[in-house]
Image (tube, helix red, strand yellow):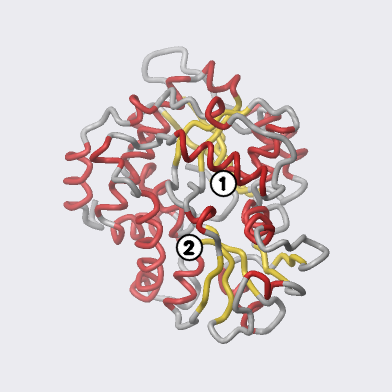
Amino acid sequence: MNIRRTAALLAAAALATTLAGCASDSPDAEGATTTIEFGLPTNMGANNSPMAVAEAMGYFADEGLKVDIVVTGDSTSIVQGIDSGSLDIGSTPPEPILQAMTKGSDLQLVYNYIRKQTGSLAVLKDSPIQSLEDFRGAVIGQASLGTSNMLLSEGILASAGLTPDVDYSHLAVGTGAAALQALKGGQVDALSLWDTEYAAFEAQGTALRYFTTDEVASLFSTTYFTSADYAGKNADTIEGFGRAMAKATLFTATNPEAALRIMYDKYPDTLVAGNSIDDQLAIDLVALERRIELLTAGDPEASGTWGAYDESALKAWAAFALDAGIIDSAVDTVAAAPNTFVEDYNDFDGDAVITEAKNWSAAE
């Protein structure tokens, strides 16, 4: 699995010109490999460790797939890449997808990856901000100004009658240590990141308080999506990709330490300079275990619902996005997420994956 990085904001043009020739190849003979150009908005880390597991454990290979990760640094560029055909499958929370749909993009949600909401606003525990109304005049740190979390935070604050660039402002601060320093140093008053980032900060001793709404907390988060055209022409590829990710997520949930060690081995730059593996594990395990709660909400292994969208959750997203001003016209989210491939995603031996995870050792 290769990782390439594109510059945020310029990614749409760059992807269209540099990746057009290397989009997925349909196998024309038994045993051929299909390449998937997969758009990811964030760098490899604990939150994305199931991707490393799917590669290392051969789950992608078992499906005849080779996955090339394109790190864009933001979500908007992924939607643009899917629209242009330079990306095959993308990963982002729904906000930018829904926005694109209102502008005519024919997109399809194909795999419900993070089944509960990851995003919220966070402040230092001793911050004077005590309510959503107190965000008036605040500067909010965002991973980038093209991130879906920025749209989510605007939706949260809209519930308190606050308007971006009028009542508060955004500032790009990145993630990890840079974001934490911006908060602790007073460059920003709050952060708008996600569960694994916050868990890592807390594991390193920073106490935080969180702000969201009941409506937002009930929404699903990161989803895999593609164009309706790609979905119609590449059913086997999507089914195989989703099945591999279901296996990898089950493996990760069963043995999170193994998932992280696999990631460190495959992607050594995920280790922070100066940290031993044990030190890194102590931080990353806290973050990953928090993420696993969201990845496995509703027990998809027992219910056979890996990748499935609940109709009520889809309707809730459409209502929230419209009410919060994220979109300016209604979107039929139920039609956009038909659960076409769910039965095939769940067609694997879960007990075998669990056994494999429990028996995994670094010597493998």
Q: Earlier in the sequence, mark 2 or mark 1?
A: 1
Residue at figure coordinates x 77%, y 67% from the top left: 169
**Element under disc 2:** helix
Q: Amino acid at mark 1?
A: Pro
Give the class, few, some or many, for how many residues have Cα within 10 Å of label 1's Cα (few <14, many ≥20): many
Residue at figure coordinates x 31%, y 40% from the top left: 247
Q: Nearer the viewer, residue 363 or 81?
A: 81
Mark 1, residue position:
93
**Element under disc 1:** loop
Q: Position of residue 308 (x, y in %)?
A: 40, 34
Q: Residue furthest right?
A: 166
Q: Is residue 274 left or right of residue 132?
A: left
Q: Is residue 163 left or right of residue 361?
A: right
Q: Position of residue 216 (x, y in %)?
A: 54, 54
Q: Nearer the viewer, residue 231 or 58?
A: 231
Q: Nearer the viewer, residue 97 or 42?
A: 97
Residue at figure coordinates x 74%, y 65% from the top left: 170
Above or below for 334 versus 29: below
Q: Quadrant of residue 300?
A: top left
Q: Amino acid at mark 2?
A: Asp
* Count of numbered labels shown in the rendering: 2
Mark 2, residue position:
195
Give the class, few, some or many, for how many residues have Cα within 10 Å of label 2's Cα (few <14, many ≥20): some
Q: Position of residue 203 (x, y in %)?
A: 42, 76
Residue at figure coordinates x 46%, y 20% from the top left: 235
The reply to whether the C-beta atoms of the residues labelled 2 and 1 are less than 8 Å apart is no
Above or below for 124 versus 277: below
As measured in the structure, the alpha-carbon distance from the residue carrying label 2 to the one carrying label 1 is: 13 Å
Above or below for 297 versus 21: below
